[in-house]
Image (cartoon, grey):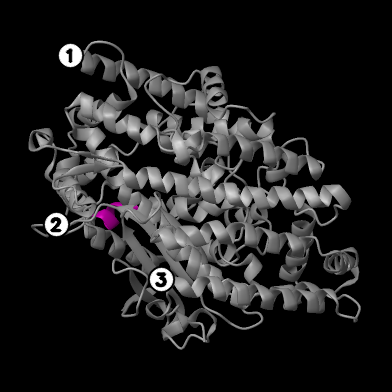
Amino acid sequence: MNPLLQDWKTPFGIAPFDAISDDDFAPALEEALAEHNAEIAAIANDPAPATFANTVEALEAVGSALDKVLSVFYSVAGADSNPAREALQRDFSPKLSAHFSEISANKALFGRVNTVWEARDTIDLTDEQARVLKLTHLGFVRAGSALTGADEARMKEIKGRLAVLGTEFTQNLLSDERNWFMKLEEADLKGLPEFVIDNARAAGEEKEAGGPVVTLSRSLITPFLQFSSRRDLREKAFKAWEARGANGGETDNRAIAAETLALRKERAALLGYNSFSDYKLETEMAKTPAAVRDLLMQVWEPAKAQANADADVLTAMMHADGVNGDLAPWDWRYYAEKRRAQEHDLDEAALKPYFQLDRMIEASFACATKLFGLKFKPLDVPLYHADCRAWEVTRNGEHVAVFIGDYFARGSKRSGAWCSAMRSQAKFPKVQAPVVINVCNFAKGNPALLSYDDARTLFHEFGHALHQMLSNVTYESVSGTSVARDFVELPSQLYEHWLDVPEVLGEFATHAKTGEAMPREMLDKVLGAATFDMGFSTVEYVASALVDLAFHEGDPPADVMVKQREILDGLGMPAAITMRHASPHFAHVFSGDGYSSGYYSYMWSEVMDADAFEAFEEASGAFDPERAKALEEHILSTGGSRDAAELYIAFRGRLPGVEALLKGRGLKAA
């Protein structure tokens, strides 16, 4: 028996990673696809009249074997890739696209779903069932189920090709990130803080480079750009970071991005939309490209004004150092760090020992305990990599979830940080508790030390995990983070606020060597510098979001880099700041459809998270029990079972404006 298809007798039904080999995936997928096809055929060909139970609810009950195979495979393929898994991804992508295209093209199945939809006003459904029916019907329509003839065939071709392109984009980016490193001689380490040197040595050991190196892992290259006094090395490292996916040859992503945009435009046109943005945003809170642009521009102008003012200060500092000419992107972080030390008397090297990974994990757990009554107990179970660890999550002695953390950067892991569910919460067709994973890319050390931004990332991803763990719905399709894309970041970004609560830092920000708590003076400086350099970070983010939106609003460009430059020039992009994600390595947008025309979502959600945390502050404070109860009841437990705007209004009593966001970022309205 293939271990992927067996009943897992492991604790809490965790995948038996120690029994699974790469050779198991392909045969398991074939068998799971065949089983799913048979299940779909049984629903589509049911001779009984279509009902919610035998059609829509029946769709919720099938595909369990396929879910098991794919959840395990994509968990390890993203976090611990190897040549075999990369080859499997290239094989699986078109195969899965064809499989799901066949389901959406099944006229008998769509006919049954449509019959139930048209009779919706005469059926006695719960609110959640009505929502599932609406989303199921809409999903079929948006997948092209109503298309016929040549249009139907072309839609299938487009989806298959997009699946291939997304996989190629991801693997090209991983290849560029994995293969580049810059060796540092001992003289090159002069002036670098001890933690940067330790991380560079650890990276050199992993690369078998015979000495310390800088890699394209954000947790290593960012502090190097902050602290290295060697402008030539900063320039070399930054240009390599910026050039990911645009180095020519087999791993170049520029043509892939251009073809992806053209195919998305054609896909939207087949469905009757003016642009891919119109198609994509129809189901989001924003609804229209105009609403997205309005929000982004309300933030762009004050952020740009702040960034330009900051650039003048940093340029003057650079000239005072005897470096003539214009401030460059590889200079910004270095002089911003110097400025932070001067203006806030805050030294990253002195600060970092207070942010131990293990203590920050404890802090994220402790906040969840205080807010929601959750408790976390370590689990000794086989996982897919030795760096992973697991916890059982309980409340009042009852099992809630399994949480897995995979925190360290390695060459086999794609960049970034993410949360996924190997199993989502549901009550139908059987009760199942979630198994949730947070994946990060922190530098390894003994002990592992985080930057303040790293700690925010940890809290952010754990906010997503809470959304999965506290889900309490009937149907898996609306469970956990299965919500509008511009709502999904609300729980994660909101949870970041608890890192800034003085009592949290006071308890958990303890020195790695002495064990002493962060001095109150330093704590005050950390919180006082919370909005430092916010013009820079806001500009690099909003520029990326505006480029993403423009790419998908108009005609697809023949050359994405030329179009990217045109958009940025039109915005008046500050010369010393680049997009957070240039097009050839913009994985959010081109590795799949997830954040395509949707990168704005983080800011849309930030409008809500800033306002939502104010609700706690307006009550008794960050751990106000009534606000915590309302947050779980109306947002964290409800998944996508209700419209996102309705959920936020139920929690807060109204929708928010942009004012709290600007205040939280220390920006002045234009």
N-terminal of the pair, mark 3 or mark 1, is 1
Mark 3 belongs to which amino acid? Phe
Residues shaded magenta: 499-505
Magenta span includes 503: yes
Mark 2 belongs to which amino acid? Ala
Q: Residue at x 34, y 33 (%)?
A: 240
x then y, percent, for residue 514? 8, 58
Q: Please tell me in which quadrant of the rendered image residue 55 appears.
A: bottom right
For the residue carrying disc 2, how many other residues have a C-alpha within 10 Å: few (<14), some (14-19), or many (20+)?
Answer: some
Q: The residue tagged with tag 1: helix, strand or loop? A: helix
Q: Nearer the viewer, mark 3 or mark 2?
A: 3
Q: Main secondary structure of the magenta part?
A: helix
Q: Which mark is residue 403?
A: 3
The Cα–Cα distance between marks 2 and 1, rounded to whole angstroms, is 36 Å
x then y, percent, for residue 655? 62, 46
Q: Which mark is residue 512?
A: 2
The Cα–Cα distance between marks 3 and 1, rounded to whole angstroms, is 50 Å
Judge whether residue 471 can be spotted in this image. yes
